Amino acid sequence: MNQYVTGAIIKKLREKNHLTQAELANKLNVSDKTISKWETGKGYPDISLLEPIAVAFGISVTELISGEEIANQNVSSNMMRSNFYVCPVCGNVIHSMGEAVITCHGVQLYPTIADDLDSSHELKVEKVEDEYYVRLEHEMTKQHYISFIAAVSSDRIQMVKLYPEQNPEARFQINGVRKIYFYCNRDGLFATQV
């Protein structure tokens, strides 16, 4: 049975933070024998201790549970590093500029990987004054539809959420748009340069 946090992770984090078992126990208001039991796999911390353990190590609960440190390496992120996360439960769309740890409905989401356009996902882009008019020839039923269309420039994102039985089209201010993304609920994310 997989536990939510292992003793090996606790030991690794404790040693990394230069804490003795007694010092960690004192921070958590438990005995040093309890810490020893966790680290040797003879017991596991109560779920109510997850947040205090994470605080003691200066990490998030997500990092504690996953056993992986999350470091922000995107000091100067820009929109061209856009990632889209789509919840398989509710269809929620989440955008990030670079790496992120995202969950929705208790499910960890991973960034969708954009494919190039194919014959069943052709995007038509027309320039109309100061806007791009974007449309697809794609069915829009409850079983198969385009969920969103997004236009990304180096400093902003414009996104239009679409719903079944709606036309798969959108208008975006040109404003330096360099890439257009759209998401098909069956076939995933697609992207093209403008």
Image: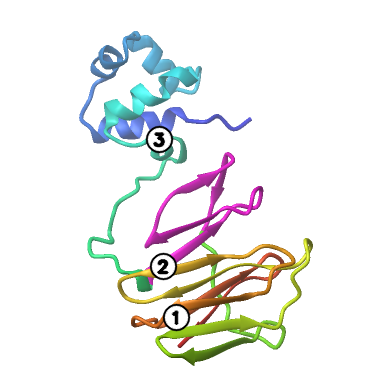
* Vertical arrangement, residue 30 with respect to residue 137, above or below: above
Q: Which residues are magenta?
A: 81-110
| Residue 167 rendering spot, x and y as whole percentages | 68, 74
| Residue 146 rendering spot, x and y as whole percentages | 66, 69
Amino acid at dot 2: Ser
Q: Is residue 111 left or right of residue 183?
A: left
| Label 1: element kind | strand
| Label 3: element kind | helix
- Residue at left offset 44%, top offset 16%: 37
Residue at which label 2 appears = 82
- Residue at left offset 39%, top offset 83%: 174
Question: Of the residues under marks 3 and 2, which one precedes in the sequence?
Answer: 3
Kindly tell me whether residue 173 is visible in this rendering: yes
Residue at which label 1 appears = 179
* Vertical arrangement, residue 11 with respect to residue 109, above or below: above
* Image quarter of the N terminus: top right
